[in-house]
Image (cartoon, rainbow, N blue to C red):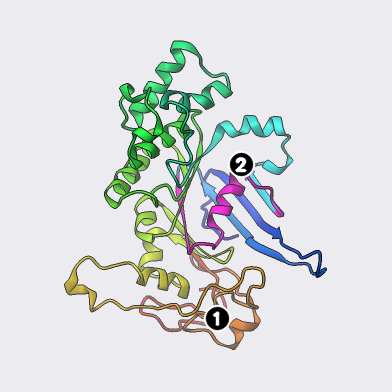
Amino acid sequence: MNDLIRKNDEILLELKNVKKYYDISNSFLKNKSYLKAVDDISLRVRKGETIGIVGESGCGKSTLGNLIMQMLPLTEGQILFEGEDMSNLSANQLRKKRLDFQMIFQDPFSSLNPRMKVLDIIAEPLRTYRIAKGEELENKVYSLMDLVGLNKSQAYRYPHEFSGGQRQRIGIARALALNPKLIVCDEPISALDVSIQAQILNLLSNLQKKLGLTYIFIGHGIPAVKYISDRIAVMYMGKIVEIADKNEIVKNPKHPYTEALLSAIPVPDPKLRGNKKQTVIEGDVPNPVNPPSGCRFHTRCLYAEEKCKREEPQMKRLHSYHQFACHYPINHQGGKEFENGTA
């Protein structure tokens, strides 16, 4: 199991061997081929925590978020929400279940209907589920706007009249309208200016504390993900290659890919930049239709050896809060630490 859970933890979401393959077979050539966007991921999410998911573009992290949201059908595996298998639900049962999980999208402009006023955008889920109407509905919308830092006087404006940060606040208010337990944040700050990113991260953090929310936070950059997350899972070519407590994974990465991602973080102080070790990943990401044998990262890894080409590494446990999939894990200075077994 690719996660780190204690005995008394309350599990809100559980993924069991989740796979999403896209059939791209060529009927003319009569060959079967699949793009393996998500390939055998198991993960458990505790109630009230934030799990950050990081990786390069195309690693499958957004696809994983869409699978959790039931926006895409599974190829294999199970997704359990509060112990209930989502794939076994009828359309009507799933519709009712959607009250408990919502999504914040990457682009705060295209995710909002340009022909609808803010009040109607935020009120739409409340109307759909017939939770409120009339004056009660308006007051509910005003309350949600206030919660995310918007003024109720803005309720009758259109999305194009707002800045990027304000649009994302509208999207967050809409996601909160049904009082969900889980929110999937699909790169919610990547389209925003750096100064606005910090405001949205602080808003999400404060809302989590106030409302007891659980987040799955998908992002490219480790610093932003680390700021809001309790644990960080690193994805590469459809698989989780390392998962740990956020401070542990930054201070003591074990997978070479994690080390490379950390080395790409810029150092603000010019005096310290020369002392930072750079780990450069050579080559391009392999074709997910025909992934490398053994470890999928071995074609770009500085420490790869023959075993890496032959055998796919299984998850090893370093501590109760740190797991990784690597035959030759590194220490925080780089270099081999051990070959076999679980530390």
Q: In the image, which disc is placed on residue 93?
A: none
Total marks drawn?
A: 2
Of residues 321 and 105, which is closer to you in this image? 105
Q: Locate the N terminus by quadrant.
A: bottom right
Choose the circle earlier in sequence order: 2 or 1: 2
**Residue type of the residue flagged with mark 2:** Phe
Residue in the picture at 47% in, 24% down: 120
Q: Give the image location of residue 73, x and y in percent.
A: 69, 48
Q: Give the image location of residue 237, x and y in percent.
A: 57, 66
Residue in the picture at 62% in, 44% down: 71
**Residue type of the residue flagged with mark 1:** Thr
Residue in the picture at 50% in, 73% down: 343
**Above-or-below relation of 37 to 133:** below
Residue in the picture at 40% in, 17% down: 139
Q: Say which residue label 2 marks.
A: 81
Q: In the image, which disc is placed on residue 299?
A: 1
